[in-house]
Image (cartoon, grey):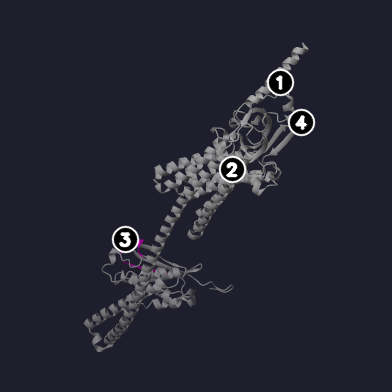
Amino acid sequence: MKRNRCLFFILGVALWLVSLVSHALELRSDQGLEEPVLLHGHEEIFIDTSGNISIEDILSGREGVEFIAGDTRHGRLRPGEIYWIRFSLQREPSAPSQWAVQIFPNWIDDVEVYRRDASGKISVDRVGDQHPFVERTIRSGMLAFPVEAGSSPETYYVRVRTHGLAPLCLHVWQRAGMERVETSRMVLVSALAGAFGVMVLMNLIFWVWLRNGIYAVYALFLAFMFVFVALMQGYANSLLFPEAPVVADRFMDVISSALMSIGAVFAWRFFDYDSYSPWAAWLMKAAAATFAATAFLSAWGVQAAVHVAIYLQMGVGVFNLGFFVWLMLRHRAFHYLLATTIFTCVNLSWTFYVLVLLGVVNMSQPYLLDSWIPMLQLANLAMLNFAVASRSRQAELALRSERKVAFDSMKVAKKALEDRVRQREFVAVVSHEFRTPLAIVDAVAHALELSPSGRDEAVKRAVGKIRKAIRRLAVLIENILQDDALAVGSTKPAARSFDLREVIESVAGVGLPEENARLSVEAPTQRTMCMGDPAKIEMAIRNLVHNALKYSPSNSTVTVRCDSMTGFFSVTVCNQGEPIPDGEQSSLFERYFRGATSTQVPGSGLGLHISRTIARQHGGDVVLLSSDDQGTVFRLTIPLEPAPLGLPR
């Protein structure tokens, strides 16, 4: 019985050794130089769900430890689980003995490689993001560990623990081939650095030149994209933090989330989400803020934050694609067609990469993504840079067009100013030339009126007509000059303190004797002080009185009533003329406006406009109180000068 048991044991060991030989990957001298040798098909997998299995448990055949044939490219680890991978290597006699096994992706947290030598001693090699780069046996941007292949099978056990996505791909290089690939990767990263540097510099120039923040955002996006690509190549440990693996690991997550945040901001700004859809713009801003929050959480070591960012980025990519289609179909924004196509390609390439990492998409050689994705992103970003440059060209043309319009407007304004100056000079000359002969004619008419001939009724009527026409022309010239002065003068008149009683008393003699006889002026009985220009205030009141005289029957009375209110002084002018139509009342104070009822009455249409302008310059106003069958009432109000404390006004 004991002999049978021994025979069964020996047979089992023999079968186990035969199985190892049959599953061992034989390495040839022509392999591992230009491209790696894939291990899938030669791997056996055991998933430690407890996380407590040691290499001694594995080698001793502990109960529950069972390796099965599998493909690590299709697997994903849940939190707390550990991958154990077993494979065997041997070489043909002509092949070199120094080889290396590379692991994809580059950011696996913890990898421990065990091998039992001929003496039975177990050797261990540790690599991964949580081990310092300076302690690695193979110091390369690629995550790799050395193996020594012999003519007989050598078995290796790989223990893998990670918090990230883990569709693992193990492949074997000759050491010379790995060194050649590492050199090529360094050349690639250097070329990418130059290309990204040129694009960043170009966009910074556009930013300074065109004063448009979109170029600064895109420059920042490009800078973070290059850092991200470099980190994908595994250079966070080797170049940035060779002695701080935890910092390097977190830095990768932070840069990934920050890149997504800046990309969301760039898409929102470049495609002008605010103009087309405020709610879509709000969603993009919220996504950018969420990505920024995940970057902050990743910096504090929250491992799940980057997972949230990755899934959110996929959702944002789908949303952007839908928005771009809607933009083309609804708003016909075909000037964005090139940019949307390229931006969609960038999103799709990133999404494809994530889907491979998630295991949704299976690739026979996923490690190729390490070189494909950076080159594809570079090509897409270079094309997107052309789209941004095209936008800058359009912005430049628009800027030139605006400058041309501004220059043409400046020329028109200059010509208008010259015409205005000539017009003012003409008005000044004409008014001066008119005043002298008018004064002479008025003096002669007055002398004729006082002469013996002036007693004749016909002469009296003629002299009255002459003096009335002279008065009308004088008022017209004065209004034109005053309107010109108000149009080009300052909004604040030259102010001094004066007594309004003097102004009201002078208004009582604004017209000819027969006109003054129609006036009923109620001047203030006590000292009424105001701060402003008395000549202008007098003109404002005089224009109201002239209007009341002109637009009322010659045998009717025009009343001028003065009132003092709290802080204000009002002058109310009432006549008994025809009512002003309702449709014209809103236009009374416009420059040169004359109503339908004023066609038979001479005037310029400036009086009311000048009165209101002067009143408002002094802090008051002129308003139409009423206009009906009883007559028309205008009121001018101006603020009074504050009285000194303790003294009556």
Q: Nearer the viewer, residue 292 or 462?
A: 292
Which numbered disc, 2 or 1, marks the residue that appears first in the sequence?
Answer: 1
At 67% from the left edge and 46% from the top edge, which residue is drawn? Answer: 247
Specify the amino acid type for callout 1: Val
Q: Nearer the viewer, residue 471 or 555?
A: 471
**Of discs 1 and 3, which sits in the foreground?**
1
Specify the amino acid type for callout 2: Val
Disc 2: which residue: 181
- Seen as rendered, the residue at the extreme front is 94
Which numbered disc, 2 or 4, marks the residue that appears first in the sequence?
Answer: 4
Q: Nearer the viewer, residue 304 or 640?
A: 304
Disc 1: which residue: 13
Q: Along the horizontal axis of the image, is 287 left or right of 523?
A: right
* Label 3: element kind: loop
Cα distance between the residues tagged 4 and 3: 119 Å
Image height check: is 259 above or below 443?
Answer: above
Q: Which mark is residue 433?
A: none
Quadrant of the image occupied by residue 94: top right
Disc 3: which residue: 581
Disc 4: which residue: 119
Specify the amino acid type for callout 4: Ser
Q: Along the horizontal axis of the image, is 176 left or right of 420?
A: right
Give coordinates of residue 48: x percent, y percent.
Answer: 68, 28
**Of discs 2 and 4, which sits in the foreground?**
4
* Label 2: element kind: helix
Cβ–Cβ under 8 Å for marks 4 and 3: no
